[in-house]
Image: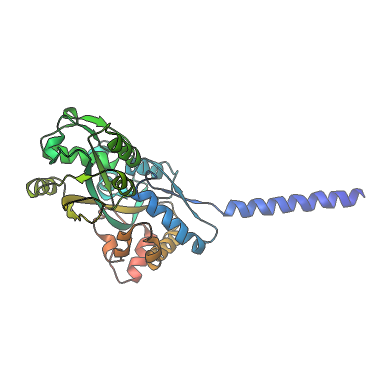
Amino acid sequence: MKKRLLFFVFFLSLLITACSGAAGGSKDIIMATGGTAGTYFAVGSSMATVLNPALGRNLLSVHATGGSRENIRMLSDRKASLAIVQNDILHYAYNGTNLYEGETDKPRFRAVAGLYDEAVQIVTCDENLNSVADLKGKTVCVGDKGSGGELNARQILEAYGITFDDITVVNSSFAEAADGLANGSIDAAFIVAGAPTKAVVDLARTKKIRLLGIDDEHIDSLKKKCDFYTTAVISKDTYSGLSEDAATVCVRATLVASDKMPRDQVYEIVRLLFEKKENIASAHENIRDLSPQNALNGVSIPFHEGAKSYYQEMGIQVN
């Protein structure tokens, strides 16, 4: 009886060890995205839904965050393996310039793919606001504090001779900005995301919205000072109730990986990203335009070795 008991205890310990080993081999791939009402979160969630059945044991786990700067911090702190980041913030962080001036830590991330263009959308429900110049003295949401969108808002306002001291600055998520526009607590909001953006779509269902365009003179000025900007036009058909198109500038949403992420794992994610882009595009139609050729556009930092391998197989030279 004693021998049987000892055998049972021994067998049970082996079983627990085996199960623990299996669990230890299965680890989520944390992806840092953005606020739940923004495009980063929607795209990341769609990627997880579509790619996870094919990835096996290491599954994508999407985390809502404050945006690009927090995502860079999570990659640097090894709290995330993947992230979506604006290409301008990515450039600054990798090279230790602008927002990252004086930082000496070695960059811990590499590029995977430029995903889609993000339009700077300046949204208002105030019919008396007709230009960015009219924002002086107003209450304006400029995005989450420290986000890429906040930096874009600062740069665009400065092009019009307006500083943050000239407005009442509000830092909040897209969803909170939409609520503020709806209840009149803010006059306008800078929303930097792929258009259409869920928070703005929802707002346009209940309120008459307008987009403040950026004129050619100021677009040219911005592009000369910040060469990562490109020009775009947001069609009046993008949101319910718009009566005219709005000219603006764009940055590029970029998928980034930790430099410690295994080469084979990144290769597989890149391969699936392109093969299943039509399914992922259910979260945002701009993903349909993604290709191995244009995935390099706007990316100024080195690519992860796993991503390089895929692009080189496609006959594309990557630095």
Depth check: 161 or 173 in front? 173
Numbered-mark total: 0
What residue is at 27 percent from the left and 44 percent from the top?
191
Residue 55 in percent (x, y) is at: 50, 61
Residue 294 in percent (x, y) is at: 26, 63
Residue 204 in percent (x, y) is at: 28, 47
Residue 39 appearing in the image: yes
Depth check: 90 or 169 in front? 169
Depth check: 142 or 224 in front? 142
What residue is at 18 percent from the left and 27 percent from the top?
165
> What kind of colouring is applied to the model shown?
rainbow
Residue 129 sits in quarter: top left
Q: Is 97 rendered above or below residue 319? A: above
Left or right of 276 in this view: 242: left
Farthest-out residue, left: 217
Depth check: 292 or 121 in front? 121
Image quadrant occupied by the C terminus: bottom left
Left or right of 248 in this view: 273: right
Residue 258 appearing in the image: no
Residue 64 in percent (x, y) is at: 42, 44
What residue is at 74 percent from the left and 53 percent from the top?
14
